[in-house]
Image (cartoon, rainbow, N blue to C red):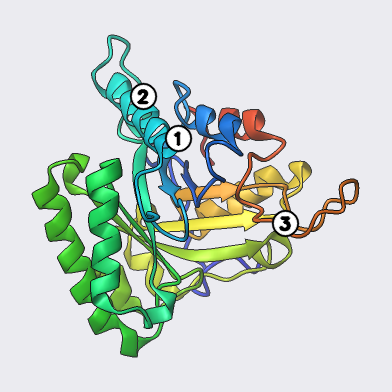
Amino acid sequence: MPYLTSTGTARRTGAAEQLGFGVPGYAHPLLAPAEWAELARPGTPLHWAVLNIDNGPGTRPDPHCLEAAGRLRNARERAVHGEEALDPVRASAGRLLGRIDLAHGDRPLDEVIADARSFLDWYRVDGFYLDRCPAGRPGLPAVRRLTSTLAVLLADSGSARGGGHLVLGHDTHPYPGYAEAADQLVTFRGPWTDYRWSQVAEWTAAYPPGRFAHFVHGVPRTHLEEAMRVARWQGAGTIFFTDRTGEADPVSRRGQTDPFATLPRYWDEIVSRIGPGISE
């Protein structure tokens, strides 16, 4: 089984460490109203969702994104403080993260900080998803400085619940030191054909499952259970699996799209599979 660690250590998540969703970024709320509505539906095991207006926060507040952000924020408040208590995984979830493109370390720091301030001022985000984050050792010092600065901004803003949340979008296993620079690392993003045979880096065994996220597209409905087994074995606590592939639509003949921009066709099924009582 290629997705086991080389030492053979089983790293399954238990009932207290259930899988939850991380949404890499749905389309604009006008284009994906059903997707954004699902995020605010009571009982959805959502860890966080990424808000991306125009490769970042855009140049001015977007009223449709403001509304979607408000609905998600209100849904989380109801889950945490409502009369009907939800399980801990769901009640602590629902963070909104602003997407900031690091361009593999090529963007100037002042541009990145400006994006962060706009997200905080306009959308009251709970943290940041740092996309295209460097993964090699040389880029680590700059990323550490950046995440330290962002943590201070989040703390000073007062809008981030629980002190803010930072996710590094490497999309592969980075140099181990990055695990100390943020709350979570995205260590896989790609097709099911690669994921089902993937291997986990040995150093990840030193960290709890909640530190890692996996985004997999092209997962057939018949392989959902296997995909979740791979995630648990590899120590991923946050996932997004979809049957979408991003390939051109054979009917409309439209070009490629982001496979993570819309709901998977089996959304209700995967929500129920990740619900209470799901364990190995």
Q: Which residue is mark 2?
A: 75
Amino acid at circle 2: Ala
Q: Nearer the viewer, mark 2 or mark 1?
A: 1
| Residue contact at pointers 2 and 1, CB within 8 angstroms | no
Amino acid at circle 1: His
Q: For residue 136, what is the image quadrant?
A: bottom left
Is residue 142 something one can see in this rendering? yes
Residue nearest the viewer, comparing 44 with 120: 120
Q: Which residue is mark 1?
A: 64
Q: For residue 80, what is the image quadrant?
A: top left
Amino acid at circle 3: Gly
Q: Is residue 42 left or right of residue 256?
A: left
Quadrant in which the N terminus is drawn: bottom right
Q: Earlier in the sequence, mark 2 or mark 1?
A: 1
Farthest residue in the top direction? 83
Q: Earlier in the sequence, mark 1 or mark 3?
A: 1
Q: Which residue is mark 3?
A: 246
Task: Classify 10 Å Cα crowding around label 2: few (below 14), some (14-19), many (20 and above).
Answer: many
Question: Residue at point 48% right, 23% down?
Answer: 41
